[in-house]
Amino acid sequence: MLNEFLLGVGIVTGLNAFLALLLVLAERTLSHYGPCTLTINDEKKLVVPGGRDLLSTLKSEGLFIPSACGGRGSCGLCKVTVLDGGDPLATEIPWLKPEEIARHVRLACQVRIKHDLRLQLPREWFAIRQFQATVVSIRDLTHDIKELRLRLVDPPEIEFQAGQFIQLEVPPYELTDEPVYRAYSISSPPSNRREIELEIRYVPNGLCTTWVHRHLNVGDPVTFNGPYGQFVLKPGNRPIIAIAGGSGMAPLKAIFLDMAEKGMARSVRYFFGARSRRDLFLVEEMKALETRIPGFQFIPALSSPLPEDRWEGETGLITDVAARHVPDASEAEAYLCGSSFLIKAAIAMLTERGMPRERIYFDDFG
């Protein structure tokens, strides 16, 4: 009886192994589409191997497309116009508006290159480059947020606008067997072209945040590409309402430091939310901007202050705090950075107070 059982197990195991081998062979055979030609903006032609996704293929050719999730289809940033590229997949539909679908917009990470394709890419993407840098300092801003300062090596300088972001490359290590990319806003002003700062919050088991918080050291080389994004200060003199939480401090810090350096005078109310005092950081630096930017006001708040915090400032969710200070937002414009919950709550609060939706700016990292 035991021998018959073992024989059955062996047969099933052998069949499974045989089927797995067939699948591997089928994948190798069916996914080999040969060389394919990508025609970009009806000008540039690239001959690339078929079978790979469009996002990683373009990256290997030195063309970098915005992507916060590293190609997992969970951020919706890598939108490109793909002519003759077929209909979007079910994984793309949630990220695409009906008018985008009509214009043949796809997510580059979800497009598998199986034949020649014609693409339309924004011209500014051709200026995005890959950079080699060295970690020159790592500072604890809070118990779970580190400030990373990177010195450019090759090329030695970067030009960007305050509020833009880069994609940091995570090399293979214990949590990933291939390089992955994650998006982080630059927290330093663009006046220093030789260095950039990032503020990275630890996410348990996060591929990039674990690498940064547990493995990265001063002196280590790093790779990133960029800059990306349109989350930049808009021209004009409208009053500014800024709302952020956690590492959402980063792009707003860059914008306000840039304003101070350029001597810009503009009404700004900056609401920054944290859970307790241990989650609050750069308070003195932000308060100092009140003397450097005429009309600037920094308003920190704690949603759940602890008794030992001895907190005497604003309390509550940061959007509720902002609502108490902003009865009428019809003449202002807003800059938001934080969790999706914060973004949605802030949009609802501001539009209820008369702010047109088109004057509310944020980077949607999914």
Image: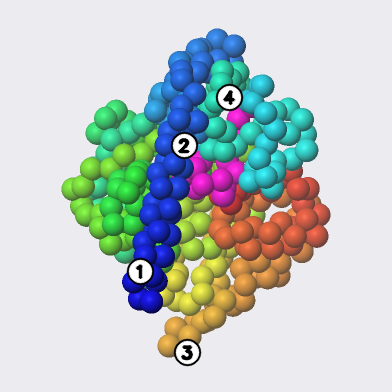
Judge from the rendering whether residue 165 lies leftward or rightward of residue 294; answer left or right.
Answer: left
Which of the two labelled residues, at mark 2 and mark 1, occupies the earlier sequence position?
1
For the residues labelled 1 and 4, the Cα–Cα distance comes to 62 Å
Q: Nearer the viewer, residue 292 or 306?
A: 306
For the residues labelled 4 and 2, the Cα–Cα distance comes to 34 Å
Which of the two labelled residues, at mark 1 and mark 4, occupies the earlier sequence position?
1
Q: Nearer the viewer, residue 57 or 220?
A: 57
Which residue is at a point 43% across and 53% down the rendered structure image?
Answer: 15
Q: Which mark is residue 122?
A: 4
Q: At which x and y percent is residue 23?
A: 46, 42
Q: Secondary structure at mark 2?
A: helix
Which of the two labelled residues, at mark 4 and mark 3, occupies the earlier sequence position?
4
Q: Is residue 136 magenta?
A: no
Nearer the viewer's eye, disc 3 or disc 2?
2
For the residues labelled 3 and 2, the Cα–Cα distance comes to 60 Å
Q: Which residue is mark 1?
A: 6
In magenta, the rendered stretch is 67-81
Q: Is residue 290 above or below residue 35?
A: below
Q: Which amino acid type is marked by label 4?
A: Pro
Q: Which residue is mark 2?
A: 27
Q: Which amino acid type is marked by label 1?
A: Leu
Which residue is at a point 51% across and 16% down the rendered structure image?
Answer: 37
Which residue is at a point 60% across and 37% down the rendered structure image?
Answer: 107
Report the label total: 4
Q: Secondary structure at mark 1?
A: helix
Which of the two labelled residues, at mark 1 and mark 3, occupies the earlier sequence position?
1
